[in-house]
Image: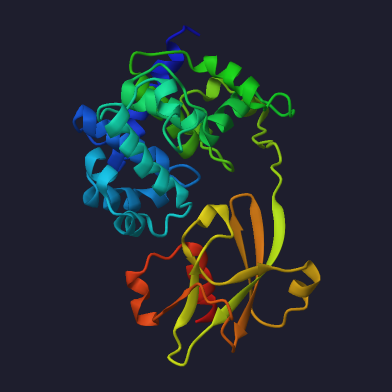
């Protein structure tokens, strides 16, 4: 196995099989940087197929860094509506303003500069450096993790640690086409080395894969603590049947977004609830929600009523929409 055999095989496969994605269009250097920034923010905790239509809509209405730094929050949230994790949109705008003011309108190309932007952590900084600036880096996302775990047949908790996976990524080698290569390795994980039923027959590196030789493709993950909590969503309506909402100050992941009034309840109260119940997974929380229709409006009214006819004009998180769809 020569030092270039793996990069050459992977890039050849990528050139023939890569997906057509809107942020991969051939555009100017500055536009590529903007597309990479927006797409990487959107792809945090969200699948590619979900992001595509949001990215296209977002960049058609907010086409560059300058317009992003000046966009009104109402328009920003409307363009992000339904994508979830709304703090990403707020951080994206903050980042644009910082790039304009501190970096003279140019996306920083080094890790220190990128990490100074709100919402940009270790992975996102490395992905931007590789994709937008052609740095010889392989960012490790879930897809790349899966490829490494299978290539080296990593099963023990120590073996699948982030530290060990970063050591193992030297397997991929280097190439001058660093931007394409970073995306190519992730693409193999997304299209071929799937969580179940991997397409090994099409994989350009299956001959080097220990899991393929052992015919054992099970992926071991480090268990993340997933809290299970119980809530009651209180549904108030006035005589006109308008719904009462308030700006969220309860949950970090929906700050300032419209939600139904909610309060945490004991598990036993949830189990004994006779009305409708739904489950919603948010961040690392498994939310069990009991829906209660209320007749009397709350005494401390710090919310607002929404006419059902006006819902399409209001930016609602998917969280609120799921509860709304359940009661309607």
For the point 66% across and 69% down, the residue is: 263
Residue 140 lies left or right of residue 57; in this view the side is: right
Farthest-out residue, top: 2
Count how many numbered circles sit on residues in the image. Answer: 0
Q: Is residue 308 visible?
A: yes
Q: 137 above or below 201?
A: above
Front one among 271 and 208: 271
For the point 64% across and 28% down, the residue is: 211
Colour pattern of the rendering: rainbow
Q: Is residue 184 visible?
A: no
What percent of the width, then of the height, locates residue 75?
29, 57
Farthest-out residue, bottom: 239
Q: Quadrant of residue 91?
A: top left
Q: Quadrant of residue 4?
A: top left
Farthest-out residue, right: 268
Farthest-out residue, left: 28
Front one among 120 and 183: 120
Q: Quadrant of residue 8?
A: top left
What percent of the width, then of the height, locates residue 225?
71, 45
For the point 52% across and 28% down, the residue is: 140
For the point 54% across and 80% down, the residue is: 327
Front one among 117 and 52: 117
What percent of the width, then of the height, locates residue 180?
35, 25
Q: 202 above or below 325?
A: above
Q: 288 above or below 119?
A: below
What percent of the width, then of the height, locates residue 105?
25, 30
């Amino acid at each position: 196995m020569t030092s270039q055999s793996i990069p050459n095989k992977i890039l050849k496969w990528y050139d023939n099989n890569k997906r057509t994605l809107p942020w991969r269009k051939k555009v100017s250097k500055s536009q590529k940087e903007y597309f990479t920034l927006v797409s990487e923010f959107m792809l945090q905790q969200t699948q590619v197929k979900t992001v595509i239509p949001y990215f296209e809509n977002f960049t058609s209405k907010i086409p560059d860094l300058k317009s992003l730094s000046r966009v009104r929050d109402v328009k920003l949230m409307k363009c992000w509506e339904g994508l979830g994790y709304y703090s990403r949109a707020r951080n994206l705008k903050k980042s644009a303003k910082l790039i304009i003011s501190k970096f003279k309108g140019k996306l920083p190309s080094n890790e220190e500069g990128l990490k100074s932007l709100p919402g940009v952590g270790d992975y996102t900084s490395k992905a931007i450096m590789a994709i937008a600036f052609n740095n010889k880096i392989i960012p490790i996302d879930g897809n790349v993790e899966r490829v490494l775990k299978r290539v080296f047949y990593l099963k023990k908790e120590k073996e699948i640690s982030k530290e060990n996976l970063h050591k193992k990524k030297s397997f991929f080698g280097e190439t001058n086409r660093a931007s394409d290569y970073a995306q190519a390795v992730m693409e193999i994980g997304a299209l071929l080395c799937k969580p179940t039923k991997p397409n090994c027959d099409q994989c350009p590196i299956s001959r080097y894969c220990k899991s393929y030789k052992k015919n054992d493709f099970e992926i071991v993950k480090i268990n993340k603590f997933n809290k299970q909590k119980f809530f009651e969503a209180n549904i108030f309506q006035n005589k006109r049947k308008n719904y009462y909402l308030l700006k969220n100050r309860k949950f970090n992941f929906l700050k300032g977004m419209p939600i139904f009034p909610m309060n945490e309840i004991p598990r036993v109260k949830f189990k004994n609830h006779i009305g409708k119940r739904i489950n919603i997974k948010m961040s690392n929380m498994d939310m069990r929600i009991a829906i209660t229709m209320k007749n009397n409006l709350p005494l401390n009214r710090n919310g607002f009523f929404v006419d059902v006819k006006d819902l399409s004009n209001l930016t609602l998180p998917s969280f609120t929409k799921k509860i709304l769809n359940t009661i309607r």
